[in-house]
Image (cartoon, rainbow, N blue to C red):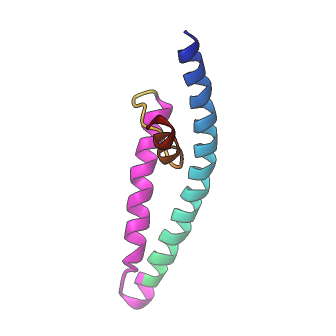
Amino acid sequence: MKSQRKEGLLRILISGISGIIFYIWTWLTIILSVINLVWTILSGEKIKEFYGFSEEYSKELNIFARYVSFTSDDRPLPFKKIFKKFNN
């Protein structure tokens, strides 16, 4: 029982911190998308370096949504690497 309570409190803390990170990351992704759109219209070429950034964002956002909704126990960025070190 205490283990589930501890996990629940930890999940709230992790969700809050990761939520702040994803809020900032979302706005950065929107800004970069607008820059890419304008650049594509003006030059006719896409900025390919933004693809990896957007792809990584969507993958991590999916992990975050699954963690917050209790669908998965995989912790979101930046906590997945931190807790792997402690669990090994």
State which region is magenta.
40-69
Residue 55 part of the magenta segment: yes
Please tell me whether residue 44 is drawn above or below residue 73 in the rendered image: below
The majority secondary structure of the magenta stretch comes to: helix
In the image, residue 17 above or below residue 3: below
Front position in the image: 19 or 3? 3
Q: Quadrant of residue 51?
A: bottom left
Query: Which residue is at the far bottom?
Result: 43
Q: Quadrant of the C terminus?
A: top left
Which residue shows up at 53% across the image and 49% down it? 78
Q: Nearer the viewer, residue 36 or 1?
A: 1
Seen at 47% across and 39% down, the residue is 75
Which quadrant, please, contains the N terminus? Answer: top right
Q: Residue furthest top?
A: 1
Give residue 19's position: percent from left, percent from top. 59, 44
Left or right relative to 70: residue 23: right
Q: Is residue 76 magenta?
A: no
Give x and y (percent) for residue 6.
Answer: 59, 21
* In the displayed structure image, the side of residue 76 where residue 45 appears, left or right: left
Name which residue lies at 36% across and 87% down. 44
Outermost residue, front side: 88
Residue 70 in percent (x, y) is at 45, 27
